[in-house]
Amino acid sequence: MLRFLLVRIASAIPVLIILSVVTFAIIQAPPGDYADYIRSQLINQSGASFAQADEQAQAYRIAHGLDQPMVIQYVNWIKGIITRGDFGYSMFYNKPVADVVAERLPRTLALALVCHIFASVLGIGFGIWAATRQYSWIDSLLSGISFLGMTVPRFLMALIIVYLLVFQFNVSEIGSFFSPQFGGAPWSWAKFVDLVSHVWPVVAIATFGGLAYNMRVMRGNLLDTLNAQYVETARAKGLSGSAVVMRHAVPNALHPLVMYQGVVLPYMLTGEIETAIIFSLPTVGPAIVGSMAIGDVYVTATFMMVLSATLIVGNIIADMLLAMLDPRVRQYGGA
Protein backbone atom coordinates (compact mmCIF):
# COMPACT_ATOMS: atom_id res chain seq x y z
CA MET A 1 0.00 0.00 0.00
CA LEU A 2 2.83 2.41 0.86
CA ARG A 3 4.64 1.70 -2.42
CA PHE A 4 1.41 2.22 -4.31
CA LEU A 5 0.93 5.58 -2.59
CA LEU A 6 4.50 6.74 -3.29
CA VAL A 7 4.23 5.77 -6.97
CA ARG A 8 0.99 7.71 -7.35
CA ILE A 9 2.47 10.79 -5.67
CA ALA A 10 5.58 10.66 -7.87
CA SER A 11 3.49 10.31 -11.03
CA ALA A 12 1.41 13.33 -9.99
CA ILE A 13 4.37 15.75 -10.21
CA PRO A 14 4.70 15.79 -14.04
CA VAL A 15 0.91 15.95 -14.32
CA LEU A 16 0.88 19.08 -12.15
CA ILE A 17 3.62 20.65 -14.27
CA ILE A 18 1.70 20.02 -17.49
CA LEU A 19 -1.50 21.32 -15.93
CA SER A 20 0.25 24.48 -14.75
CA VAL A 21 1.52 25.19 -18.28
CA VAL A 22 -1.86 24.56 -19.89
CA THR A 23 -3.72 26.55 -17.22
CA PHE A 24 -1.41 29.55 -17.48
CA ALA A 25 -1.64 29.54 -21.28
CA ILE A 26 -5.45 29.37 -21.26
CA ILE A 27 -5.72 32.18 -18.71
CA GLN A 28 -3.42 34.39 -20.79
CA ALA A 29 -5.12 33.54 -24.08
CA PRO A 30 -7.94 36.14 -23.96
CA PRO A 31 -6.87 39.66 -24.97
CA GLY A 32 -6.25 42.23 -22.25
CA ASP A 33 -4.79 42.14 -18.75
CA TYR A 34 -5.16 43.94 -15.44
CA ALA A 35 -3.55 47.08 -16.87
CA ASP A 36 -6.46 47.33 -19.32
CA TYR A 37 -8.83 47.06 -16.37
CA ILE A 38 -6.99 49.93 -14.67
CA ARG A 39 -7.26 52.03 -17.83
CA SER A 40 -11.00 51.50 -18.07
CA GLN A 41 -11.44 52.33 -14.40
CA LEU A 42 -9.46 55.56 -14.77
CA ILE A 43 -11.57 56.61 -17.75
CA ASN A 44 -14.96 55.62 -16.34
CA GLN A 45 -14.55 56.57 -12.69
CA SER A 46 -11.81 59.21 -12.57
CA GLY A 47 -12.70 61.02 -15.79
CA ALA A 48 -9.16 60.73 -17.16
CA SER A 49 -8.55 61.04 -20.86
CA PHE A 50 -7.64 57.98 -22.86
CA ALA A 51 -4.05 59.16 -23.28
CA GLN A 52 -3.60 59.77 -19.55
CA ALA A 53 -5.23 56.47 -18.59
CA ASP A 54 -3.22 54.56 -21.19
CA GLU A 55 0.03 56.10 -19.95
CA GLN A 56 -0.67 55.00 -16.39
CA ALA A 57 -1.77 51.56 -17.57
CA GLN A 58 1.46 51.09 -19.53
CA ALA A 59 3.51 52.18 -16.52
CA TYR A 60 1.65 49.69 -14.34
CA ARG A 61 2.15 46.95 -16.94
CA ILE A 62 5.91 47.52 -17.02
CA ALA A 63 6.24 47.81 -13.24
CA HIS A 64 4.52 44.46 -12.67
CA GLY A 65 6.06 42.55 -15.58
CA LEU A 66 2.84 42.27 -17.55
CA ASP A 67 4.65 43.49 -20.67
CA GLN A 68 6.92 40.45 -20.72
CA PRO A 69 6.22 37.41 -22.92
CA MET A 70 3.91 34.77 -21.48
CA VAL A 71 6.75 32.25 -21.20
CA ILE A 72 8.82 34.63 -19.06
CA GLN A 73 5.83 35.39 -16.85
CA TYR A 74 5.19 31.68 -16.37
CA VAL A 75 8.83 30.90 -15.57
CA ASN A 76 8.99 33.74 -13.04
CA TRP A 77 5.76 32.54 -11.44
CA ILE A 78 6.92 28.92 -11.13
CA LYS A 79 10.38 30.02 -9.96
CA GLY A 80 8.82 32.10 -7.19
CA ILE A 81 6.66 29.16 -6.08
CA ILE A 82 9.57 26.69 -5.97
CA THR A 83 12.23 28.93 -4.47
CA ARG A 84 10.28 31.23 -2.14
CA GLY A 85 6.79 29.80 -1.88
CA ASP A 86 5.62 33.00 -3.58
CA PHE A 87 2.51 32.53 -5.73
CA GLY A 88 2.64 36.05 -7.08
CA TYR A 89 0.93 39.30 -6.15
CA SER A 90 -2.77 39.93 -6.50
CA MET A 91 -3.24 43.24 -8.28
CA PHE A 92 -6.94 43.47 -7.48
CA TYR A 93 -6.77 42.49 -3.79
CA ASN A 94 -3.46 44.38 -3.39
CA LYS A 95 -1.86 41.59 -1.37
CA PRO A 96 0.15 38.40 -2.01
CA VAL A 97 -1.83 35.63 -3.68
CA ALA A 98 -0.88 33.30 -0.83
CA ASP A 99 -2.79 35.58 1.55
CA VAL A 100 -5.86 35.52 -0.69
CA VAL A 101 -5.75 31.73 -0.83
CA ALA A 102 -5.16 31.46 2.93
CA GLU A 103 -8.22 33.64 3.57
CA ARG A 104 -10.63 31.85 1.25
CA LEU A 105 -9.48 28.24 0.93
CA PRO A 106 -9.89 27.03 4.56
CA ARG A 107 -13.43 28.37 4.92
CA THR A 108 -14.32 26.98 1.51
CA LEU A 109 -12.91 23.55 2.40
CA ALA A 110 -14.75 23.52 5.71
CA LEU A 111 -18.01 24.52 4.06
CA ALA A 112 -17.59 22.04 1.21
CA LEU A 113 -16.62 19.15 3.50
CA VAL A 114 -19.71 19.69 5.64
CA CYS A 115 -21.89 19.67 2.52
CA HIS A 116 -20.14 16.56 1.20
CA ILE A 117 -20.50 14.63 4.46
CA PHE A 118 -24.20 15.45 4.69
CA ALA A 119 -24.75 14.62 1.02
CA SER A 120 -22.88 11.31 1.26
CA VAL A 121 -24.44 10.06 4.50
CA LEU A 122 -27.99 11.10 3.62
CA GLY A 123 -27.72 10.15 -0.05
CA ILE A 124 -26.33 6.68 0.59
CA GLY A 125 -28.82 6.08 3.40
CA PHE A 126 -31.80 7.19 1.32
CA GLY A 127 -30.49 5.15 -1.63
CA ILE A 128 -30.40 2.00 0.48
CA TRP A 129 -33.85 2.79 1.85
CA ALA A 130 -35.30 3.29 -1.64
CA ALA A 131 -33.66 0.19 -3.14
CA THR A 132 -34.87 -2.13 -0.37
CA ARG A 133 -38.41 -0.80 -0.85
CA GLN A 134 -38.55 -0.78 -4.63
CA TYR A 135 -41.79 0.52 -6.19
CA SER A 136 -43.23 1.54 -2.82
CA TRP A 137 -44.41 5.07 -2.03
CA ILE A 138 -41.11 5.65 -0.21
CA ASP A 139 -39.17 4.72 -3.36
CA SER A 140 -41.36 7.01 -5.48
CA LEU A 141 -40.98 9.93 -3.06
CA LEU A 142 -37.20 9.59 -2.80
CA SER A 143 -36.88 9.17 -6.57
CA GLY A 144 -38.83 12.40 -7.03
CA ILE A 145 -36.55 14.20 -4.60
CA SER A 146 -33.51 12.84 -6.45
CA PHE A 147 -34.92 14.03 -9.79
CA LEU A 148 -35.49 17.54 -8.45
CA GLY A 149 -32.04 17.72 -6.89
CA MET A 150 -30.34 16.79 -10.16
CA THR A 151 -32.43 18.98 -12.47
CA VAL A 152 -33.23 22.22 -10.63
CA PRO A 153 -30.32 24.68 -11.10
CA ARG A 154 -28.56 25.68 -7.91
CA PHE A 155 -28.61 29.36 -8.76
CA LEU A 156 -32.40 29.18 -9.08
CA MET A 157 -32.73 27.60 -5.64
CA ALA A 158 -30.38 30.26 -4.27
CA LEU A 159 -32.42 33.07 -5.80
CA ILE A 160 -35.63 31.64 -4.37
CA ILE A 161 -34.10 31.39 -0.89
CA VAL A 162 -32.72 34.95 -1.12
CA TYR A 163 -36.15 36.23 -2.14
CA LEU A 164 -37.84 34.45 0.73
CA LEU A 165 -35.27 35.59 3.29
CA VAL A 166 -35.16 39.23 2.21
CA PHE A 167 -38.73 39.96 1.12
CA GLN A 168 -40.74 37.52 3.23
CA PHE A 169 -38.73 37.21 6.44
CA ASN A 170 -36.95 40.61 6.35
CA VAL A 171 -33.46 39.12 6.80
CA SER A 172 -30.86 41.81 6.13
CA GLU A 173 -27.57 40.08 6.98
CA ILE A 174 -26.80 38.25 3.74
CA GLY A 175 -23.33 38.19 2.23
CA SER A 176 -21.09 37.23 5.15
CA PHE A 177 -20.28 34.35 7.44
CA PHE A 178 -20.95 36.22 10.68
CA SER A 179 -22.96 39.12 12.07
CA PRO A 180 -20.91 42.29 12.77
CA GLN A 181 -20.73 41.63 16.52
CA PHE A 182 -19.19 38.17 15.95
CA GLY A 183 -16.71 39.11 13.19
CA GLY A 184 -13.57 39.27 15.34
CA ALA A 185 -14.89 37.58 18.46
CA PRO A 186 -13.38 34.33 19.77
CA TRP A 187 -15.20 31.10 19.08
CA SER A 188 -18.18 30.38 21.29
CA TRP A 189 -21.49 28.58 21.04
CA ALA A 190 -23.23 31.84 20.16
CA LYS A 191 -20.74 32.50 17.34
CA PHE A 192 -21.23 28.97 15.99
CA VAL A 193 -25.00 29.43 15.98
CA ASP A 194 -24.54 32.76 14.20
CA LEU A 195 -22.34 31.05 11.59
CA VAL A 196 -24.95 28.35 10.99
CA SER A 197 -27.66 30.99 10.61
CA HIS A 198 -25.63 32.63 7.82
CA VAL A 199 -24.40 29.60 5.85
CA TRP A 200 -27.34 27.19 6.10
CA PRO A 201 -28.77 28.19 2.67
CA VAL A 202 -25.50 27.36 0.90
CA VAL A 203 -25.14 24.11 2.86
CA ALA A 204 -28.74 23.13 2.13
CA ILE A 205 -28.46 23.83 -1.62
CA ALA A 206 -25.11 22.07 -2.06
CA THR A 207 -26.20 19.14 0.09
CA PHE A 208 -29.43 18.75 -1.86
CA GLY A 209 -27.59 18.46 -5.17
CA GLY A 210 -24.98 15.99 -3.87
CA LEU A 211 -27.60 14.01 -1.96
CA ALA A 212 -29.63 13.53 -5.13
CA TYR A 213 -26.65 12.17 -7.07
CA ASN A 214 -25.54 9.80 -4.30
CA MET A 215 -29.08 8.57 -3.76
CA ARG A 216 -29.67 7.86 -7.43
CA VAL A 217 -26.36 6.04 -7.93
CA MET A 218 -26.69 4.05 -4.71
CA ARG A 219 -30.23 2.97 -5.49
CA GLY A 220 -29.37 1.80 -9.00
CA ASN A 221 -26.21 -0.04 -7.98
CA LEU A 222 -27.83 -1.68 -4.98
CA LEU A 223 -30.77 -2.92 -7.06
CA ASP A 224 -28.32 -4.56 -9.47
CA THR A 225 -26.29 -6.03 -6.61
CA LEU A 226 -29.34 -7.44 -4.82
CA ASN A 227 -30.07 -9.55 -7.90
CA ALA A 228 -26.54 -10.99 -8.02
CA GLN A 229 -26.01 -14.70 -7.51
CA TYR A 230 -23.86 -14.39 -4.40
CA VAL A 231 -26.60 -12.35 -2.71
CA GLU A 232 -29.13 -15.07 -3.50
CA THR A 233 -26.70 -17.61 -2.05
CA ALA A 234 -26.39 -15.56 1.14
CA ARG A 235 -30.17 -15.50 1.45
CA ALA A 236 -30.34 -19.26 0.85
CA LYS A 237 -27.92 -19.83 3.73
CA GLY A 238 -30.44 -18.27 6.09
CA LEU A 239 -28.90 -14.85 6.68
CA SER A 240 -31.29 -12.13 7.75
CA GLY A 241 -32.37 -9.51 5.23
CA SER A 242 -30.42 -6.73 6.93
CA ALA A 243 -27.26 -8.84 7.06
CA VAL A 244 -27.54 -9.68 3.37
CA VAL A 245 -27.98 -6.04 2.44
CA MET A 246 -25.42 -4.42 4.75
CA ARG A 247 -22.68 -7.09 4.74
CA HIS A 248 -22.83 -8.38 1.18
CA ALA A 249 -24.73 -6.04 -1.13
CA VAL A 250 -23.92 -2.52 0.12
CA PRO A 251 -20.08 -2.83 0.13
CA ASN A 252 -20.11 -3.90 -3.52
CA ALA A 253 -22.67 -1.29 -4.52
CA LEU A 254 -20.46 1.44 -3.01
CA HIS A 255 -17.65 1.03 -5.59
CA PRO A 256 -18.87 3.72 -8.05
CA LEU A 257 -19.49 6.16 -5.21
CA VAL A 258 -16.01 5.53 -3.82
CA MET A 259 -14.49 6.28 -7.22
CA TYR A 260 -16.64 9.41 -7.36
CA GLN A 261 -14.59 10.74 -4.46
CA GLY A 262 -11.73 11.19 -6.93
CA VAL A 263 -13.49 14.09 -8.62
CA VAL A 264 -15.58 15.39 -5.74
CA LEU A 265 -12.79 17.40 -4.06
CA PRO A 266 -12.44 20.04 -6.78
CA TYR A 267 -16.21 19.87 -7.29
CA MET A 268 -16.64 20.68 -3.60
CA LEU A 269 -14.45 23.75 -4.01
CA THR A 270 -16.17 25.07 -7.14
CA GLY A 271 -19.67 23.63 -6.79
CA GLU A 272 -20.66 26.51 -4.56
CA ILE A 273 -19.79 29.16 -7.18
CA GLU A 274 -23.39 29.99 -8.11
CA THR A 275 -24.73 30.07 -4.57
CA ALA A 276 -21.64 31.82 -3.18
CA ILE A 277 -21.91 34.56 -5.81
CA ILE A 278 -25.62 35.06 -5.12
CA PHE A 279 -25.04 35.14 -1.36
CA SER A 280 -21.80 37.18 -1.81
CA LEU A 281 -19.76 34.84 0.38
CA PRO A 282 -15.95 35.31 0.34
CA THR A 283 -15.05 31.81 -0.87
CA VAL A 284 -12.97 30.32 -3.68
CA GLY A 285 -15.65 30.32 -6.39
CA PRO A 286 -16.31 34.06 -6.55
CA ALA A 287 -12.56 34.75 -6.36
CA ILE A 288 -11.92 32.61 -9.45
CA VAL A 289 -14.73 34.22 -11.43
CA GLY A 290 -13.82 37.73 -10.34
CA SER A 291 -10.09 37.37 -11.02
CA MET A 292 -10.75 35.97 -14.50
CA ALA A 293 -13.03 38.88 -15.33
CA ILE A 294 -10.42 41.55 -14.53
CA GLY A 295 -7.24 39.75 -15.59
CA ASP A 296 -5.77 39.12 -12.13
CA VAL A 297 -3.83 36.25 -13.62
CA TYR A 298 -1.87 34.99 -10.62
CA VAL A 299 -4.96 34.61 -8.47
CA THR A 300 -6.73 32.67 -11.21
CA ALA A 301 -3.71 30.50 -11.97
CA THR A 302 -3.07 29.68 -8.31
CA PHE A 303 -6.65 28.72 -7.59
CA MET A 304 -6.77 26.59 -10.73
CA MET A 305 -3.59 24.84 -9.61
CA VAL A 306 -5.20 24.23 -6.23
CA LEU A 307 -8.16 22.62 -8.00
CA SER A 308 -5.80 20.48 -10.11
CA ALA A 309 -3.93 19.36 -7.00
CA THR A 310 -7.17 18.46 -5.24
CA LEU A 311 -8.26 16.44 -8.27
CA ILE A 312 -5.04 14.43 -8.13
CA VAL A 313 -5.22 14.01 -4.36
CA GLY A 314 -8.88 13.01 -4.65
CA ASN A 315 -8.08 10.28 -7.17
CA ILE A 316 -5.32 8.93 -4.92
CA ILE A 317 -7.70 8.91 -1.94
CA ALA A 318 -10.36 7.16 -4.04
CA ASP A 319 -7.88 4.45 -5.10
CA MET A 320 -6.82 3.94 -1.47
CA LEU A 321 -10.42 3.70 -0.28
CA LEU A 322 -11.29 1.28 -3.07
CA ALA A 323 -8.28 -0.89 -2.18
CA MET A 324 -9.43 -0.95 1.45
CA LEU A 325 -13.00 -1.78 0.46
CA ASP A 326 -12.30 -4.45 -2.18
CA PRO A 327 -9.65 -7.14 -1.53
CA ARG A 328 -9.46 -7.85 -5.26
CA VAL A 329 -7.99 -4.38 -5.86
CA ARG A 330 -5.28 -5.02 -3.27
CA GLN A 331 -4.50 -8.41 -4.79
CA TYR A 332 -4.40 -7.48 -8.47
CA GLY A 333 -3.56 -3.80 -8.21
CA GLY A 334 -0.21 -4.26 -6.56
CA ALA A 335 -1.28 -2.41 -3.42
Image (spheres, rainbow, N blue to C red):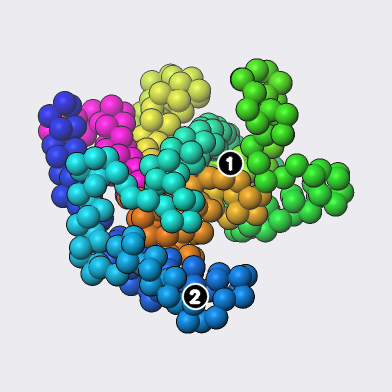
**Which residue in the protein does label 2 denote?**
53
Q: Badge 2, how many Cα within 10 Å: few under 14, some, many 20+?
A: many
Vertical relation: 318 (above or below) 68: above
The residue to which callout 1 is attached is: 207
Q: Nearer the viewer, residue 126 or 61?
A: 61
Q: Amino acid at mark 1?
A: Thr
Residue at 32% across, 47% down: 87
- Magenta stretch encompasses residue 330: yes
Image spot of residue 141 (x, y percent): 68, 45
- When the figure is inspected, residue 49 is found, relative to residue 219, above or below; the finding is below
The Cα atoms of the two marked residues, 1 and 2, are separated by: 47 Å
Residue 307 in the magenta stretch? The answer is yes
Q: Residue at x 63, y 43 (%)?
A: 202
User: What stretch of residues is rendered in magenta?
Assistant: 306-334
Foreground pick, 59 / 278: 59
The quarter in which the N terminus is drawn is top left
Q: Residue at x 31, y 35 (%)?
A: 317
